[in-house]
Image (spheres, rainbow, N blue to C red):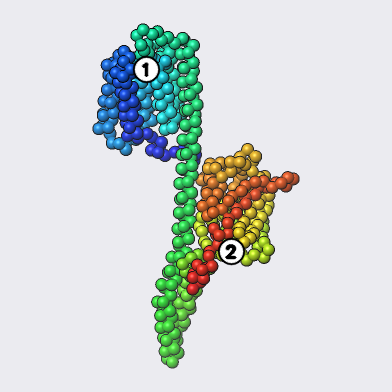
Amino acid sequence: MRPDVYDEDSRRLRVGTLIFLRWIAILGQSMACLFVYFFLDFDFPVGLCFVFIVASATLNFGLRYGTSGTFRLSDLEAVVLLCYDLVQLSFLLYLTGGVTNPFVMLLLAPVTISAVSLPRNLTLFLGIVMLSAATFLCMEYEPLPWRENEALKFPLLYRASIWASLALSAAFIALYAARVSDESRLLATALAATELVLEREQHLSQLDGLAAAAAHELGTPLATITLIIRELQKGVEKSSAEGLKDDLDLLGQEAARCREILGKLASLGADQGTMMNVLSIDTLLAEVVDPQREFGVKLEISKRGINNVAPPALARNPGLLYGLGNLVENAIDFAQSRVRIDAWWTRDLVTICIEDDGPGFSSAILDKLGDPYLRGRPTERRTKNDSQSGLGLGLFIAKTLLERSGATVETYNVSPPRTGAVVKVTWPRAALEIPAAKLIASET
């Protein structure tokens, strides 16, 4: 999925959300009016205020019983309802002091909701509506409720400063909320893509187990067929039915071929134990590198144990295999002529370093590598020519899968005057290695 294309249903506001937020506003408005009128004993048109409050409650009841709580509003429907909230609050503020009322800051709420859930052009429209209302309330309003014997006047400069604070606050909050919301949606979309990739790899891994199970189940009847063929061949040798003997010989050859095929199927898990898949470092690198050898780039592989430490026995992990494979594939795409894969291990760590001789990572995005939808180095891809490649998800998916396996992923460029990029993946050995007891159990 491209970063500028979202599922519209995931963006749309649920009508139940707006109903809930409006009930909170109605409760707050009612409590404020009653508190000021009865407890503070300030005189203001409280009855007219409750006309607008009751209008909001009526709208809420209409929405509640006219739609389901899970109904999602279109962008136009949502902006109309948010505009209503702005107008209703503006009338209440007009009756209670205009911009001099401390609750004028609540005009920012509809704009913030729009910034999170609606397109930017509609958020801009709501912002203009809000500033228009604030401009009117700055010039025309009923006096702020106050004591009868005290004059409470606010100069134009003070009211203008409140207008300016509303404008700046609306711009900052809208931009901030929109940016955070967009990043959250991008991350959710990218994680969904990661889950799909991992699910596919798990299905492929499960096919190995199914093949081994098929080999095991078919082995017994095939052995019986082979035994019967041998008995029939012995009987035919004592007779003169030469044509039948040739047919039995051919049938025996085909049965032997079937046994070889089943043996190959079973060998898919030959290095894997019955209950647990087991990989050596050699097998791991071979499975990662072998599919990438046909693209005209020299692949150099080295393996070593520091201080002659024995290599680890690794648990097969589809996410790990896919993540490393993706890193090698990317290195081949950007390499000029060579990719070097260096693996080493100690008693505590296992490290695989992938280095290419391409142009390296751009300094502008080096600190952001691993973020979704980040395209690091434009190139004509050697390994993929489909329209879905190059969306900036490859390194994100690889990094996510490898980190799930316990790895730390580092990305940097080689030191000048050479050029190239380096991806270094390091695991705690305990996160990869199969405990000795389980390894022995899988072999038995």
The residue located at (48%, 56%) in the rendering is 201
Answer whether residue 41 is visible to the viewer in this image: yes
- Describe residue 362's horizontal placement relative to residue 241 as left or right: right
Which residue occupies the extreme bottom position in the image?
Answer: 238
The residue drawn where x is 31% and y is 24% is: 31
Label 2 crowding class (10 Å Cα cut-off): few <14, some 14-19, many 20+?
A: many
Q: Looking at the picture, how far across and down is residue 158, in whole percent?
A: 48, 13
Q: Secondary structure at mark 2?
A: loop
Image: 438 above or below 179: below
Badge 2 amino acid: Pro
What percent of the width, then of the height, locates residue 159?
Answer: 46, 13
SS category of the residue bearing label 1: helix
Distance between the Cα atoms at labels 2 and 1?
71 Å
Residue at 31 percent across and 29 percent down: it is: 23
Number of the label disc, if any, that sits on residue 93: 1
> Marks 2 and 1: which is nearer the front?
1
Q: Which mark is residue 312?
A: 2
Precedes in sequence: disc 2 or disc 1: 1
Write down the quadrant of residue 321 in the picture: bottom right
Q: For residue 138, what is the image quadrant?
A: top left
At horizontal 38% and vertical 8% (from top left) the residue drawn is: 150
Please tell me which residue lies in front, 268 or 163: 163
Q: Is the residue marked by circle 1 packed among few (<14), some (14-19), or many (20+) residues within 10 Å?
A: many
Q: Which mark is residue 38?
A: none
Q: Say which of 327 and 63 sits in front.
A: 63
Q: How many marks?
A: 2
Whether residue 299 is visible here, answered yes or no, is: no
| Spot occupied by residue 55 in the image (x, y as percentages of width and height) | 28, 22
Which is more toward the observer, 68 or 157?
157
